[in-house]
Amino acid sequence: MAARDPQCGAIVLSGLGRAFSAGHDIGTEEDREYKQQQGYAVRAEQGLTPWFEDMRKVYIDFCLAWRNLPKPTIAMVHGYCIFGGWMVAASMDIIFAAEDAQFLPGFVEYFSVPFDIGPRRAKEILFEHRFMTAQEALSYGFVNRTFDPETLEKETLAYADRVAENYLDVPYWVSLCKFSINHMEETMGLNAEVESSFNNFCLMTATRTGATAPPSQGGFARTNVAKKNYQLSLPWLKKAGLTKKD
């Protein structure tokens, strides 16, 4: 509705509660019930083809729909931004984050991480599997600006107001600017990489043996491992100035 509202010049997306997004569901009964209510395929019961098609709709088509909105979009990230949360944030045009926000990228369905932070950084963090600080995300180009948690909303909305005013003044200019920058990434291979990685992700999921980690260990995102490796990396992060200053 915001995209169709002629009085709306910018869209701010935020999380309700303690975090921007904890990412994918970690295996609850509520997730199964939701999929059944929405008519989404459950792979074990309905076969691979419906499951593959629904996965594409939910994770690729929806993310690209966010990315291709004609109006400027801004993610306001606080707390955790994990796996699916990263995918949603990555689909936005601009990302502002609280200084104590923590990010966990992964090899997920909409796999834009190499474009988000660069191929070598992506390998470094994904191979180790650990949380990133907001300062790292800023340094690597994923986040545009960081703010004190108490001022994050004020600063984000103030920026959004300026963007909205500019958009409402000359909407075609802002929209074409956005689409031209998106096109640059697409000609560099973003869409092709996302398509290929999605197919590989589905192949990995369909052929995986054994269960994922239980919810107590972070489920699909294995957040217990990511937290442990983050703690082991803290000395380097502090030395590099990539942690929140006390």
Image (cartoon, rainbow, N blue to C red):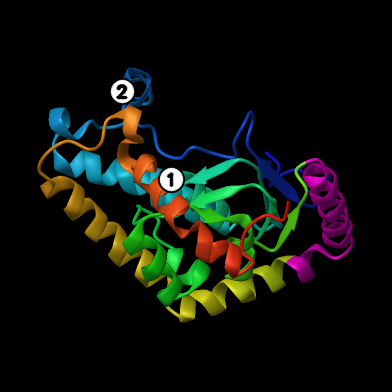
Magenta run includes residue 13: no
Dominant secondary structure of the residues highlighted in magenta in the image: helix
Q: Residue at x 57, y 55 (%)?
A: 133
Q: Residue at x 51, y 69 (%)?
A: 117
Query: Which amino acid type is marked by label 1?
Result: Lys
Find disc 2 in the rendering and name its residue: 32
- Between 236 and 99, which is closer to the camera in this rendering? 236
For the magenta stretch, what is the residue range? 150-174
In this view, 101 is above or below 22 = below
Q: Residue at x 62, y 56 (%)?
A: 134
User: In the image, residue 121 lies at what x, y percent?
Assistant: 45, 71
In this view, 154 is above or below 188 = above
Q: Secondary structure at mark 1?
A: helix
Tag shown at residue 227: 1
User: In the image, residue 122 lies at what x, y percent?
Assistant: 42, 68
Query: What is the spatial separation of the Cα atoms under label 2 and label 1, in whole angstroms?
Result: 27 Å
Q: Is residue 125 left or right of residue 203?
A: right
Tag shown at residue 19: none
| Residue 24 visible, this orientation | yes
- Between 51 and 119, which is closer to the camera in this rendering? 119
Query: Which amino acid type is marked by label 2?
Result: Arg
Q: Earlier in the sequence, mark 2 or mark 1?
A: 2
User: In the image, residue 91 lies at what x, y percent?
Assistant: 55, 56
- Circle 2 packing at 10 Å, graded few (<14), some (14-19), many (20+), is some
Magenta run includes residue 173: yes
Quadrant of image for the N terminus = top right
- Circle 1 packing at 10 Å, graded few (<14), some (14-19), many (20+), is some
